[in-house]
Image: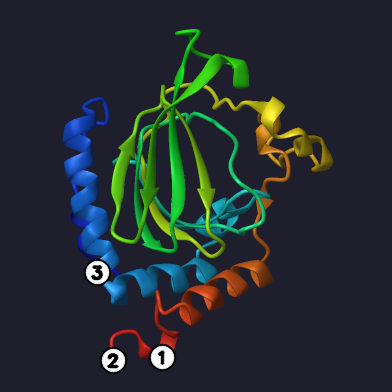
Amino acid sequence: MTNWLDEVPAFDWSNARSVHRQCRSVLTRLAGDRSLLSRLVHEIEHDPKRLAESEIHPLINRLIAYQDDARGFQIRVHMSPGSRELVPHDHKYTFTAYVLAGAYVHVWRRRTDTAEGDFTSTDIQPGIVSIERPGTCYTFGSPLVHQTIMLPGTVTLFMRGPREKPRSHAALDMWPEADQFPPSYEQGKPKHANGQRPVTMDEYRSMRSQLITRGLIDELAEIGS
């Protein structure tokens, strides 16, 4: 079944200002389109590709709500398990986030070594500190480093572009617990991906139930009614 997301054009992800306006428009509309968001989440159960790419991680869980490789973007639902804060890290891609529920402290950090690649806590300093609340929307470039401290139950929409570098990096000296988790199911992943694995069907259904209980999506029978 087609929907308005199928008509979204490919974006120029190299232009952060332009892509922020475009992604903000898409995510704001999706946040307000309860019927479509509900349908996208429910459809994951019957979409082997999106189910396989939906993941559990000790620091953040994610469901793949929409994906189009040809146009180079993916939309996820991120859900905080609420047990740990994310360590300072960068990303392989530019992304835009929109807060649906909950809140978090967001520390935008700057690298003092002016380099790229691996870093530790001694290579970064706090830059801007903000509070992200429902309705907040921001875009983050792949070279930047940030850290989030989320309230339990925080849920965000997350729209990412194509990969811009081989892997992401994190200040692992601030997450010694990484060694307590098994390596990621994907070979070649960095240590901060330890504990990352595909969701089981039961876990997916539990996450979906949480979204329904929070009033963020509808029960299947209510969609389109």
Residue on which disc 3 sits: 32
Estimate the x, y position of residue 180 in percent, counting from the top left.
Answer: 83, 41
Give the quarter of the figure containing the C terminus: bottom left
Nearer the observer, 111 or 21: 111
Asked if the residue under mark 1 is in contact with the one under mark 2, i.e. CB atoms within 8 Å, the reply is yes
The answer to whether residue 164 is above or below residue 69 is above
Q: Amino acid at mark 3?
A: Gly
Instruction: Name the image quarter holding residue 175.
Output: top right
| Sequence-wise first label, 3 or 1 | 3
Nearer the observer, 27 or 188: 27
Q: Amino acid at mark 2?
A: Ser
The answer to whether residue 147 is above or below residue 121 is below
Residue 104 located left or right of residue 8: right
Residue 143 in view here: yes
Q: Secondary structure at mark 3?
A: helix
Residue 67 in view here: no
Residue 157 located left or right of residue 209: left
Taking the spot 40% from the left edge, 76% from the top edge, the residue there is 217
Estimate the x, y position of residue 13 in percent, counting from the top left.
Answer: 27, 31
Give the quarter of the figure containing the N terminus: bottom left
Residue on which disc 2 sits: 225
